[in-house]
Amino acid sequence: MAKHSVAMAKKRWPIMLAAFLSVSTVTVLLMRSNNADSCITKHFTIAHDNQIRSPVQLTNAASNPLNFMKSKLVLMVSHELSLSGGPLLLMELAFLLRGVGSDVVWITNQKPAEPDQIIYSLESKMMDRGVQVLSAKGEKAIDTALKADMVILNTAVAGKWLDVVLKEKIAPVLPKVLWWIHEMRGHYFKVEYVKHLPFVAGAMIDSHTTAEYWKNRTRERLGIKMPETYVVHLGNSKELMDVAEDSVAKRVLREHVRESLGVRNDDLLFAIINSVSRGKGQDMFLRSFYESLQLIQEKKLQLPTLHAVVVGSDMNAQTKFEMELRKFVIEKKIQDRVHFVNKTLAVAPYLAAIDVLVQNSQARGECFGRITIEAMAFRLPVLGTAAGGTMEIVVNGTTGLLHPVGKEGVAPLAKNIVKLATHVEKRLTMGKKGYERVKERFLEHHMSQRIASVLKEVLEKARQ
């Protein structure tokens, strides 16, 4: 019967597999969300200037928490349009609002001079869903900003658009601006980016850690005060959860990906899924992985073969950092244990195929780190850095294990890799606990309700 189910699944899923595994089909697999689920969240908190409170709960389970946005005109301004987290999150919100009948207009502030296939694909996707796409400059952009019920600026860098385009008409727009900030790096704290922050309706930030960092940094470095600040944790889309909760689908994806990587079904895969860059810590991860292999050899542990998977490579760019990673792998003679996978929006197949996610972002860590809650949805334990939003997602010792950032974290991460490779029951229990945590607070309807509470307050301020 099980074999029959898998055979049937393989017939049902070829289109999905093609969409997931082909990087070129951006328009097919682009968005991870659809219309918001209408279930009631059990618990959530929103922080105002870092004071946490619980908003009034919505009591009608049949209603979408964003329904009050019907017919509202919302202008969204993104600093860029790419496959990075910030623009994709804003697109996701655009589609949620379109799902309840909002009029959504999109502006991309910075575009390359030459035609760009990714931008073309993403804009086409938005227009297909009823989002109007405007040029960043011109009278139409100004008129839309003045008429809009709400303006959402996405990332700190988008603040430049206010002065460049609105100029003397900026004053009536600021009171209806919600500024959605995702950055955790110091170079974003420039006056030309964020000088209007104190005068907007509010700032929405993905984690308490990041909100506190922005509050302190803007005050100490720039001498400006943050506006009312809302902390909104993200949630997994219904589509991703559908895959994560379909055991047959996961089995098909697991077999397919493992076959493409050339690894066996009983091998253990530890994966880092992030764009390849020094801040994401792939170099530290590979050092830890190499040390874990040494520990296994020294202790003469009888374990399945361990593999490291680096998803987020850029085969075309051939960056200096990625060349360093590949050189390290060759020098340590672990080419048969390390697999580089080109960057993709299709994370589900790899989450279905691996055994443990490594979230190794360095310095201040991730602002939130959505891949972490996506991995937990697939019942994967997480080995993460004790920094940033990861600490608000991973419960150390329960849903995963945390280690320090920097060189100090290499040895602890290596030991944690060996620990989870050795203790099967611990690995499975952590994965189960992570899945339960996602179901409690990190689903799409949780995020919709959290955002709905913020949008209501911003609209009220705009009216006042």
Image (spheres, rainbow, N blue to C red):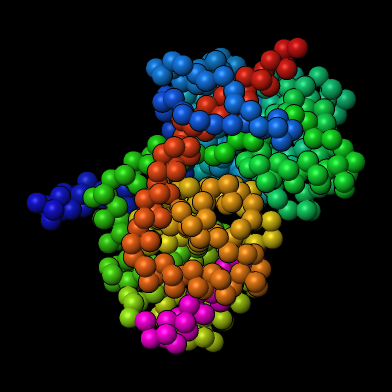
Q: Is residue 238 above or below residue 426?
A: above
Q: Is residue 47 above or below residue 400?
A: above
From where the camera sits, is residue 378 visible? no
Q: Which residues are magenta?
A: 277-301
As drawn, is 162 to the left or to the right of 40? right
Quadrant in the rendering for residue 266? bottom left
Q: Which residue ends up furthest to the left in the rendered image?
A: 1
**Residue 5: x %, y % from top left:** 15, 50
Quadrant of the image containing the C terminus = top right
Q: Main secondary structure of the magenta part?
A: helix
As drawn, is 167 to the left or to the right of 418? right
Quadrant in the rendering for residue 287? bottom right
Q: Is residue 415 above or below residue 254?
A: below
**Residue 386: x %, y % from top left:** 61, 58
**Residue 43: x %, y % from top left:** 50, 30
Depth check: 9 or 148 in front?
A: 9
Q: Which residue ends up furthest to the front in the rendered image?
A: 397
Residue at image position (46%, 29%) is 42
Residue at image position (47%, 84%) is 294
Depth check: 133 or 60 in front?
A: 60
From where the camera sits, is residue 258 visible? yes
Depth check: 365 or 177 in front?
A: 365
Depth check: 448 or 110 in front?
A: 448
